[in-house]
Image (cartoon, helix red, strand yellow):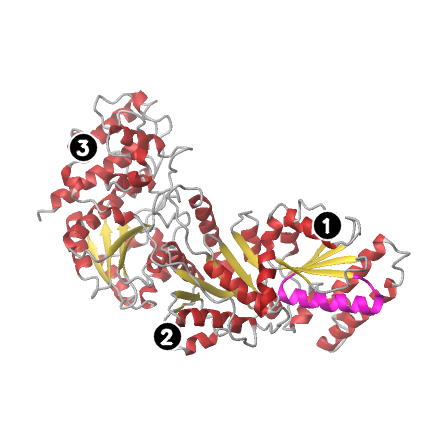
C-alpha cells in the first residue's frame, strides 16, 4: 500500500528521538561525528517496549488521516508508563509538546532541550507523569489502562480512545477483568475503545503468557470475551488492520494484537539467546557508551541506522511526510466537555443518610446532569437501591463486582472531565488503595504543572462501616492510608446526620481537584441539624453540640463518625445528669481540619475550653483506627491530654453494633468510664464522686454484655 512508506518513515523518526533522549545531551541530530562528550553520563529510560509503541502510534496516526471521520475525537492512553521517551518523541513530532512547553519547539534548540530534559531532575522523568500535557494515565501501577480508557468514553459518544497495552500488563488481574468492560457501556450512548496489545513476548524478567499462546488460542480467548481479535504478525498487517478497526468502529468490537520483537531495530548480541537479548533490551541495551569503546561504536551505529538527515529538513524540523501524519489531539484530554456542575444541597427528606444522598444524585440526573455512579454490586445493600428503580437514572449506574474496574473507569471519566461517584463498603474499598494513591500522586504533580486544568473531584461514598458488619467486613484503613500522605486535597468527611451528609455530597460534586471520602453508617436515621445550619457546619468542618457554656468546662469530648457522635452524646448526657459535669462535645466533620498542622483544632480548643488550662482532659472517639488520629495530632499543643478511642480489630462474633463498640472500647459506657478516669487522674479530691459513677457505668456495660451472650463466659474479657 502507498501509505506503508510514510508509516515506516514516521516510525524511524520516533525511534530515533526515543534513543536520542535516552543517550544524547548534545549533537542531537548527528550533524557532526558522534563524540563521547555528546553522550549523557548516565543514560536512562526503557527501550524494549518503545519500538512497538512507536509503530502502533504511527499506524494510529495513519488510520486517523485515512478515516475522514472529522467528527470523532481521537485520544490515546499508553499503558506502559515506563516508555515515556517514546511518548515524548511522538508528542514532539506531532507538535503537541511545544504548545505547552515552547522550549521544546521544532528545530535544533528545541530538540536539544528535550533530550537534556528527559530523565533529568528539572525536566521529564523516565516514567509517564502528570507533567506530560494532556496525560491522564501515569501508569505507575500496571493494569488500569484498559478500564481507564473505557472510562474516558463514558457519556461521550464521539470519542474514540486507543489504548496500548503491554503483553505483560495483560497478565494483571485488573486488565484481565477489564476486557469485559465493553459489556458495561452501550455504544449508542458512549464512545468507543480500540485496544492494541504490544505483544513483544517478554516482561522485564521472563516470557509473557500471551507469547506462549497461538494465534487461534488468542482469537478464541477474545471471542469468548465478546471481542474480535485481529492478530498482526508484521507492521504491514497492523497498518491495514488499524485502518479497518477505525472504519468499522461502530459495528465491530476489535482488539489488535501486534506480535513484535522486544527492542526491535535496537542492538543485539549474536552470542546471546533471543531471550537474553530481549531481557537486555528492556531498559538501556547499551550500558557504558562513554567508558567502553565497543559500546560507543554500537550506540553510534544504532543512531545512524535511522538516518536522521532523512527525518529532519534543512530547518531541523520534521520533514513534510511526517508533518502530514500529525494529529495533535491524539495526546490531549485537556478540553472540558461539560459546564460547571450545580446540584442541590438537599432534597426531600428520606429515612436515612443514604436516602438523602440518593435524592441528590437522582434529582441532579433527572435535571440533565451527567453524574455516573460506580459501584461493585453494592448499591442496594448500601441503601441506594431506589436509583435502580428509575429507568433514566439507571442508565447512569455502572455496577460490576470488581473494585479495580470501578476505580479505573471512574478515573478515566473524571480525568476526561466527567462527573461521578463511587459507592462501596468501607471494608472493601481498600482493594483500590494503591490505585487511589497513584491517582493522588498524579493529582499532586498535575496541580504544580503549568498546563493543568481544573477537573472534577473524585468522590467516594463509603457505608457499611465496621460497626455495622461482621468481623471479616471490618476494615477502616482506606481513609488512614490516604490521609497519612498529607495532601491538602484529600478530605475524609464524616456526617453526623443526613443533612450534613447531603451538604457534603453536594459540595463534593461541585468541587475540583480533590479526593473526597464520605463515610457513614447506612442505617443512620439521625436528623439533628437543620439543613440551614448544616451548610455552615460542613464549611467550618466541625459542630459544637449544645451545652451550658456559662459553666467552666470539666472535659472536652471530640468525635468523628455518626455512630461515635451518638455514643458520645449519650455518655455526655449521662455524666451531666449523674455527676453534674460540664462537658463540651465537638464533632469533627472533616479530618482535613487536623492536617492543617493542628492550628485550626488548637484554635477551636483554645476557644471552647472556657477558662480551663491546656491540661484539660480531652477524649477523642473515632470511627476508625486510633493511630490515625494520634498521628494527625502530633503537632497539637493539646496532644499530651488527648486520649483517642477507636477501632482496634477486636471481636469475632455476629453481634449488634453496640456490642462491637463494647468489644473495641468505644461504647457510651467506655467513653464515660474513660472520662471519669482522666478527671480522677487530674484531681482525685475534686472528682472523688466519679469513682461511684465509673462503677455504675461498668455495671451497665457488664449487664449489656451479659444480655448479648446469655451468660458470664464473655463478660470478664469484654469489661
Q: Is residue 693 above or below residue 631?
A: below
Of callouts 3 and 1, the N-terminal one:
3
For disc 3, the marked residue is: 312
Mark 3 vs mark 2: give the one in front.
2
Residue in the image at 42% along x and 45% along y? 446
The front one of 217 and 65 is: 65
Residue neighbourhood size for the residue with mark 2, other residues' Cα within 10 Å, grouped as few (<14), some (14–19), many (≥20): few
| Side of 253 relative to 499 (left or right) | left
Q: Which residue is mark 1?
A: 606
Rendered residue at 78%/57% (across/down): 555
The image quadrant that residue 451 belongs to is top left
| Mark 1 secondary-structure assignment | helix
Label 2: which secondary element: helix
Task: Tell me where residue 705 appears, x and y as whole percent.
Answer: 74, 73
Give the mark, 1 or 2, whose residue is nearer the N terminus: 2
Q: What is the magenta range?
A: 560-582
Q: Secondary structure at mark 3?
A: loop
- In whole angstroms, how far apart are the C-alphas of marks 1 and 2? 51 Å
Of all residues, the one furthest to the left in this rendering is 2
Left/right of residue 227 with respect to residue 123 in the rendered view: left
422 falls in the magenta region: no
Label 1 vs label 2, nearer the camera: 1
Disc on the earlier residue, 3 or 2? 3
x then y, percent, for residue 693: 84, 66
Disc 2 target residue? 392
Amino acid at each position: 500500500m502507498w501509505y506503508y512508506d510514510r508509516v515506516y518513515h514516521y516510525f524511524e523518526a520516533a525511534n530515533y528521538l526515543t534513543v536520542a533522549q535516552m543517550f544524547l545531551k548534545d549533537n542531537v541530530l548527528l550533524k557532526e561525528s558522534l563524540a563521547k562528550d555528546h553522550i549523557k553520563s548516565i543514560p536512562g529510560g526503557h527501550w524494549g517496549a518503545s519500538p512497538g509503541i512507536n509503530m502502533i502510534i504511527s499506524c494510529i496516526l495513519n488510520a486517523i488521516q485515512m478515516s475522514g471521520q472529522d467528527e470523532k475525537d481521537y485520544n490515546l492512553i499508553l499503558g506502559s508508563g515506563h516508555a515515556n521517551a517514546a511518548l515524548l518523541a511522538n508528542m514532539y513530532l506531532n507538535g503537541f509538546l511545544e504548545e505547552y512547553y515552547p522550549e521544546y519547539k521544532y528545530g535544533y534548540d528545541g530538540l536539544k532541550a528535550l533530550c537534556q530534559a528527559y530523565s533529568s531532575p528539572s525536566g521529564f522523568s523516565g516514567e509517564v507523569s502528570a507533567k506530560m500535557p494532556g496525560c491522564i494515565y501515569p501508569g505507575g501501577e500496571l493494569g488500569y489502562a484498559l478500564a481507564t480508557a473505557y472510562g474516558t468514553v463514558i457519556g461521550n459518544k464521539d470519542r474514540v480512545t486507543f489504548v496500548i497495552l503491554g503483553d505483560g500488563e495483560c497478565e494483571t488481574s485488573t486488565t484481565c477483568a477489564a476486557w469485559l468492560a465493553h459489556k458495561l457501556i452501550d455504544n449508542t450512548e458512549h464512545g468507543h475503545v480500540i485496544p492494541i496489545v504490544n505483544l513483544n513476548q517478554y516482561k522485564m524478567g521472563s516470557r509473557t503468557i500471551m507469547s506462549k499462546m497461538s494465534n487461534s488460542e488468542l482469537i478464541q480467548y477474545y471471542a469468548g470475551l465478546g471481542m474480535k481479535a485481529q492478530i498482526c504478525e508484521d507492521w504491514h498487517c497492523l497498518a491495514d488492520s488499524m485502518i479497518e478497526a477505525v472504519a468499522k468502529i461502530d459495528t465491530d468490537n476489535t482488539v489488535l494484537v501486534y506480535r513484535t520483537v522486544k527492542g526491535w531495530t535496537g542492538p543485539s548480541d549474536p552470542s546471546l539467546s533471543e531471550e537474553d537479548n530481549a531481557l537486555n533490551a528492556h531498559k538501556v541495551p547499551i550500558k557504558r557508551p562513554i567508558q567502553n569503546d565497543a559500546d560507543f561504536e554500537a550506540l553510534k551505529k544504532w543512531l545512524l541506522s535511522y538516518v536522521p538527515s532523512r527525518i529532519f529538513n534543512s530547518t531541523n524540523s520534521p520533514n513534510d511526510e511526517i508533518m502530514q501524519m500529525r494529529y495533535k489531539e491524539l495526546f490531549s484530554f485537556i478540553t472540558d466537555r461539560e459546564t460547571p456542575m450545580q446540584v442541590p444541597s438537599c432534597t426531600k427528606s428520606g429515612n436515612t443518610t443514604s436516602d438523602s444522598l440518593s435524592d441528590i444524585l437522582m434529582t441532579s440526573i433527572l435535571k440533565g446532569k451527567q453524574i455516573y455512579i460506580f459501584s461493585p454490586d453494592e448499591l442496594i445493600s448500601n441503601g441506594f437501591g431506589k436509583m435502580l428503580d428509575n429507568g433514566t437514572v439507571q442508565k447512569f449506574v455502572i455496577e460490576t463486582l470488581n473494585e479495580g474496574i470501578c476505580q479505573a473507569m471512574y478515573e478515566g471519566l473524571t480525568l476526561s472531565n466527567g462527573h461521578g461517584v463511587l459507592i462501596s463498603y468501607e471494608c472493601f474499598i481498600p482493594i483500590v488503595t494503591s490505585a487511589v494513591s497513584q491517582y493522588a500522586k498524579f493529582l499532586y504533580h498535575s496541580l504544580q504543572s503549568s498546563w493543568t486544568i481544573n477537573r472534577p473531584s473524585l468522590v467516594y461514598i463509603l457505608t457499611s462501616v465496621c460497626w455495622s458488619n461482621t468481623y471479616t467486613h471490618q476494615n477502616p484503613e482506606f481513609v488512614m492510608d490516604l490521609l497519612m500522605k498529607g495532601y491538602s486535597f484529600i478530605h475524609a468527611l464524616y456526617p453526623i446526620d443526613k443533612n450534613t451528609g447531603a451538604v457534603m455530597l453536594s459540595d463534593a460534586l461541585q468541587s475540583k481537584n480533590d479526593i473526597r471520602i464520605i463515610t457513614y453508617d447506612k442505617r443512620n436515621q439521625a436528623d439533628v441539624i437543620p439543613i440551614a445550619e448544616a451548610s455552615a457546619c460542613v464549611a467550618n468542618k466541625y459542630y459544637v453540640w449544645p451545652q451550658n457554656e456559662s459553666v467552666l468546662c470539666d472535659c472536652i469530648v471530640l468525635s468523628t463518625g455518626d455512630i461515635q457522635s451518638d455514643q458520645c452524646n449519650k455518655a455526655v448526657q449521662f455524666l451531666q445528669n449523674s455527676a453534674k459535669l460540664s462537658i463540651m462535645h465537638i464533632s469533627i466533620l472533616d479530618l482535613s481540619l487536623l492536617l492543617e498542622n493542628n492550628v485550626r483544632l488548637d484554635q477551636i480548643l483554645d476557644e471552647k475550653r472556657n477558662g480551663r488550662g491546656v491540661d484539660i482532659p480531652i477524649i477523642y472517639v473515632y470511627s476508625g483506627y486510633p493511630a490515625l488520629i494520634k498521628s494527625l495530632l502530633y503537632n497539637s499543643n493539646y496532644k499530651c491530654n488527648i486520649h483517642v478511642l477507636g477501632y482496634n480489630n477486636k471481636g469475632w462474633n455476629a453481634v449488634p453494633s453496640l456490642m462491637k463498640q463494647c468489644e473495641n472500647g468505644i461504647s457510651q459506657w467506655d467513653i464515660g468510664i474513660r472520662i471519669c478516669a482522666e478527671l480522677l487522674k487530674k484531681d482525685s479530691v475534686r472528682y472523688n464522686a466519679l469513682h461511684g459513677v465509673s462503677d455504675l457505668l461498668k455495671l451497665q456495660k457488664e449487664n449489656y454484655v451479659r444480655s448479648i451472650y446469655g451468660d458470664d463466659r464473655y463478660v470478664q474479657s469484654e469489661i
